[in-house]
Every structure is written in structure tokens, then in C-alpha cells.
Amino acid sequence: MTVIKRLITTTLTVLILAALVYPCFAASPTTSSPTPHYRRVGSGEDAYYEIDYYTVSSAAQLRGLASLLSPDGPVYLTCDIWLNPDENPTGEEFSPIGSENRAFVGTFDGQGHTIHNLYVYQPDRDCTGLFGKISGTIRNLTVTGTVTGHTDAGGVAGYLDRGSISNVTSEVTVNGYLEVGGVVGYAGGSVTNSTNKGNVKATYGAGGVAGSSSSAMSGCANYGNIAVTETAAGGITSASSGTITDCTNHGSVSSTQQSGGVVGALNGTVSNCVNYGTITGDFFIGGISSRIYTGGEINGCYNYGSVDARNMAGGVTGYNDEGTIDNCHNRKDVTANIMVAGIAGYNKGTITNCTSTGKITSLAEEFTGGIAGENDGHIEDSYFEDGSADITTGSPDSSSGSETGSGVRDDTWFDENYPADKEPGAADNPDSPGGDDGSKTDVVLSQDTIIEENETYPVDGNTNLVIPGGVTLTDKGILDNDGSVTVKDQGTLIIDITGAITGDGVVIVENGGKVINNSDSPVTVVTDDGINETVSPGETYQPGETSVGEKDTTLETDTTIPEGEIYPVAPDETLRVPSDVTLTVEGEIENEGQIVVEDNGTVVIEETGSITGGGIIVVQPGGTIINGGNTSITIVTDGGGTSIILPGETHTEQPQLYVTAQAETGGSISPSGRISIAYGGSITFTISPESGYEIDTVAVNGISIGAVSSYTMTDIKDSSTIQAFFKQTDTGGTYVSSGGGSGCNATHASAALLSCVVLLATLYRKKKNR
């Protein structure tokens, strides 16, 4: 009896404490499984269904992917996902998909979508990121947020065991101890066409794209700042035993030892890469690589970033330890105490076909060279420009190394042989800009670019930086322009309040280009016809008319072309039929340019009418063509396809649109799933909570519209999403939202535990009364 009494008393105590404490642990994130999609295999009685692929369309399903590490098919992200709201981006921590001991081995395809506001703070955990460890494929994805881990931390993945990462952009701030990268911590598989825009910090080993790499990296770019407190930092990766091809660094790179514009420590190969960032540190500091180990190779690379170190610094590498440097070129200043040079601070390997034009400065005036600061290796056919340095190699015993054809310190060789600058990966071509004709090389920005505050973006005297149409360069730091910057039609250059343009170069603004000067200093620009203009602080400058649609004519009212009349549309003209306007053709339109029928615009070709000429007819979504004429009409849809409208037919352009409706834990939305919608159509949704839940909020295209029970989407002209979130009804205890809770009511759980207490107490009384 005593034992039973003690057992029941102890059990009661535990249950009471559990009932009281349980609410503190109830708020764990909601998870749900990715949605499987099946395909039919075979026919008749032998037919069966197997999984074809999965879809993820909510934060809960993304968390649930952690329980599906070996999916039977690829996993597709169907929409943008916010793991935390923009106003509280670190509100809820995310647990990485896959761990050090269990990797994700499938394919995750973001389909161009973004996962917003990832937050991981696990400073003692290895393998941290959106994915902890993968042995599969991640592609077509953008991630924003903050990740803090220990070893192998990355914005997208902590550890890429094998497999690949491609077409991925990381806008994640990443912090860690060892092997820390903007995209991936350790890359044991290939990383291609991926970009980092977040800052990266580590104690040892940080890279803009990968913390370290033993595989292939190609077509990658870094715009973040890389900072290491101890050893090994690189604009693309801190260390590589694989290949790095066609990669570009724009961010600053700093560490105590081994800082490189592209890679820190190298015993692999680097080809056709470019550095624009400022590289700093104490020892082994280089514009392309910090240190080349035996067997390492660098070829076809350019450095446009300043290199500043204590000792052993070079425009290409700080220390060439029996590696090979071929066809590499330094265009920026290199400064250190000793062992400082245009190509290698200290050379024990081979240097061939290299040039340096940057100013070489030794603060201690020892071991300073145009090519090598100290040379115990082989130098051949390599040259430095007059005034950049005093001698080819600074070593007192430099004669021990071969210097065939090297050491020219006047302009004669450069006048005749100046190597063509080039974009990353561009093929050598003597007839291309920047070749033997002495013109500048075009470096064309391929995407919106930001020069961050305290950063310097150098434009060499032999470079023309091109801002093409649709691209914006925002200068929050310093645009150091010694060449030229050309703002093309529909391109934009913004000088921010903290930004400045320095150097002796020119800014050329072509017709349709735009310069916005928000700084406190005037900016001088040159029009493409050679006229200087001053853009004062606070002003916007845009010369001429745009070259696209030079003669747009937009009909303002219903218009009829009478029978017997001809209306010409010139080759450089666009005739627009806007909303609620009808163009009736009883005569003839001689179209050599283009006719654009906009949303709710209508073109009617009567029996006597016709449209002739070699121009095109573009029908945008919602536009209508009524062909009452005697000949077929070919139209171009807004997506670029073509359709033929036969005589007597009417065509209204209606692209295929979808609304994806989802409900998180705690309720339902009707209709749900992926719903096909006609262009301009409407649909009403009903949101219903389950028992014990209430509506938390409803979000349309990621924007909250409140806790509504019904919502009607009207005039739908783009594919959209609607998500319903629920929370448990507040009955005096705590509740959690379906977007971030466990889906289990803490008050109800406490009541259940207290019921157990009552039951055990009853049993005890019955036992005692026997």
C-alpha cells in the first residue's frame, strides 16, 4: 500500500507540474507534408499510380519537407513563401532541412520563387542554412534572411555533399565559425550561375558563394562583403581544390591571412575570373588568390580591385608556391611593406604572359617588383607599365629565376601589345573592343547592382562600364571611374546620398538613359552627341526621347477609318488602341510598324476593311480582334506567340491564369488548390475555422487583408495566391497561430492532464476504501 501510495502521489505531482508547465512548450511551428502528385502507369487491369512529383506552397509544407528527405520525385515550390513577416524577419526560427547525419537527397526546384525572411540561429550546430545537408539538387531559387551556425553554414545550404546548386541567389547574412558561405558552406558538388548578395563573416574560411569548394564552380558572382577574423577568405570561396570558371567578385574581402579576390588558398584551377573588390589583410593577400599551392593554376584572370596588405601582396596572388599563372592582368594599385608586386608578392612557380599597370608601393621599400616582389621561380613574357614599379622583381637574387622577355618599363610594348580587357568568360579576340585598336572594353551589367556604402567599384581607364536598358546601378559608396560609364536607353544610374563618383573618367548618358543625383555634389555627364551637362544635387537628368516607340500614337476615342481611306503606320510608329476604345476599319491600315491592342481595347475589321503591310499586330491580355473582313489576320500575343484569326472569327486574348488557395492548420478555404481563372474573372472564397480555432488572418499575394471569413477576388489579371491562417480560440490560456504554432491548444491539453489527475485520485480513494 505504501509503495502504491507513493507511486500515485509522485504521478500526481508530475502530472500537475506538467499541466502547469505545458503551455510554455506548446508553441512549436506548424508543419504539413508536401503535396504528392501522381501519374498513371500502364493500362487496363495492370494500371497503377506512382508519385510523379511533390509541390510546396506554404511555410508549413516547407518545414514538413524535413520529414521527406528522400522524395520519390522532384519537389517544386509553387509560390513565394514568407517564413517571417517583413516587419519581424527574425520572429520565428527555422529548422534546417536535413542534418549532418541525414541529407536531403532529392531535387528542390524553386521555379524562380523566393523564400523570404529565413531565420536560423544555431551557433553551436554544424550544417546550417535553409538546407542543412544535401546530396541532391537545388535550383531556380532566391532566399533572403539571416543564418548563424558553426561549421558549414550557408544561406541556402550548409553542406553540399554531392549533387548541384544552380541558378540560386542568396540575400542572406551568414555568420559562423568555419567554412561559411553566402550560398553554401561546403561545396562538394557543383555550383553554377549562382549569386550572393549578403555579407558573410567567419572565424576561419569564408567565401561569397561557398565557404570552401572541392568541385566545380562556374558563372557565379558575389556582391557581399567577406570578413574573416583569422585565416582564409575569398570573394567566391575561401579555398578550392576544384575548378572556378567565369566568376566575378564585387565585394570587399578581408582576413588576417590569405585574402583573395576570387579564392583564398588554391590548389585547383581558376580561369576567366574577375575581381573588382578591395582586398585587405596582413599576409598572403592577392587580387585573385591569396596563395597558390603546388599544382594550382590561374589563367585568363583580371584584377581591378585595390590590394592592401602588411607583407606578401600581389595583383594576382600573394604567394605563388610552385603554381602556374598565365595570361593574367593587374589593373589596380598594390600596397604592402615588403614582397609586393603587380602579379605575385613572392614567386616560386611560373608566371607567363602577364601584365601589370597598377601602382606598386612598398612601405618598407624592400622586395618590390612590377611582376614579382621576390622571385625564386620562372617569369617569361610578362610586362609592367612605366611608372608602376621600378624593377621587374625586387629580390636581390632574382637572377636565379628566368625573366625572358620581361621587365619592360616603358610604354613602347604596351602601345603595341596592350592586352584586351574583357568581361568574365569572354573569349580572347584581337578585333573586339579593347583589342589592338586601343578602344575601351565594354563591361555590361547583367542585373541591378548596388555599390554598398564604404565599398569602391573601380572602372579602369581601359573599361567602359555599360548600364543597359532595364538595369539600375545604385552607387551608395564610391564609383571610382577612370574609364567611362555609359547609361543606355532605359538604363538608370542612381548616386545615393552616401554615394560619390571619383576618378578622371566620363559618364555618358545616351538618349533615354537616366541619372538620378541624390548626393550632395554635382555630377557632370556627357550626352552621346558630346555636350557636357551638370546634374545638380536632387536633380534627375534624362536626355532626348526613348528609342523604343519613338512615335507612339494612342487613340483617345472610338475611331473609324472610312471606306476608301488609307491610314499609314510608319516603321518606327506604334498605334495603340487602349481600354474602352474601338478602332473600326472600313478602309485600309497600311501597317509597317506595330498596332497594339491593349486590355479592353477592340479592333473591328469590317467586310470592306483590311490591314496590310509588313508590321505586326500585338494583342495584349484582354484585347479583342473582330475579323469581319475577307482575309486572315496574324496576331502576336503578349507572351510572344502567334495566332491566326480567320474571316468571321472573334479573338479575345485570355492567358491561362491560376489562383492557388491554401489553408493552414485549423481550418479550411473553399474552393481550394490550384484554380483556373479566366482573364478579368472573379472568384469568391469562404474561410471556415475548425472547432476550437478562429481566423487569424487571410493573405492575398502575401499581403494581409485581415481576419475575413469571405473574400472575393475581382478583375483577376495575374496568377495569384490566397492563404488562410488560423489560431486557437483564446479561452483564458495561451493560443498559437496556425502559421507558427503546434496546432494543439495548451488550455485543452492542461485540462486533459488535470482529468488524469482526477482519475488517479479516484482510483487511489477506491483502493484505500477496500
Image: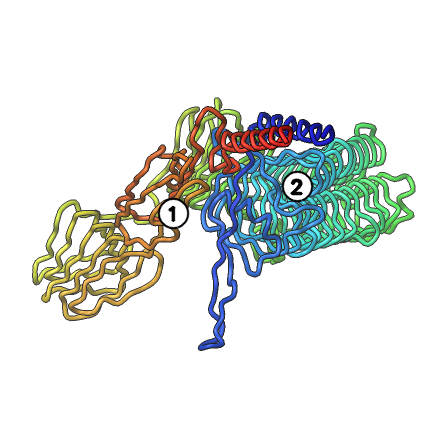
Question: Which of the image's four quarters has the C terminus?
Answer: top right
Front position in the image: 368 or 757: 757
Badge 1 vs badge 2, beta-carbon distance below 8 Å: no
Q: Is residue 266 above or below residue 733?
A: below
Q: Residues within 10 Å of mark 2 (few under 14, many from 20)?
A: many
Tell me, for residue 521, which label it has, or none: none
Q: Earlier in the sequence, mark 1 or mark 2?
A: 2
Q: Which mark is residue 128?
A: 2
Q: Position of residue 171 (x, y in %)?
A: 56, 39
Q: Quadrant of residue 426?
A: bottom right
Residue 507 in percent (x, y) is at: 49, 37
Q: Determine whether the residue tagged by mark 2 lies in a helix, strand or loop.
A: loop
Q: Nearer the viewer, mark 1 or mark 2?
A: 1
* Picture residue at 53% right of the left edge, 54% below the top: 109
Label 1 Cα crowd, 10 Å radius (few <14 / some 14-19 / many 20+) = many
Front residue (pair 158, 510): 158
Amino acid identity at mark 1: Ala
| Location of residue 451 in the rendering, given as x and y in whole percent from the top left corner | 55, 34
Q: CA distance from mark 1 to mark 2?
A: 31 Å
Q: Which residue is mark 1?
A: 661
Q: Going by the image, does 566 lie left or right of 301? A: left
Q: Amino acid at mark 2?
A: Thr
Q: Is residue 523 visible?
A: yes
Which image quadrant: the N terminus? Answer: top right
Q: Nearer the viewer, residue 629 or 530?
A: 629
Q: Position of residue 630 (x, y in %)?
A: 15, 70
Q: Is residue 413 visible in this depiction of the protein?
A: no
Residue drawn 81% across and 30% down? 337
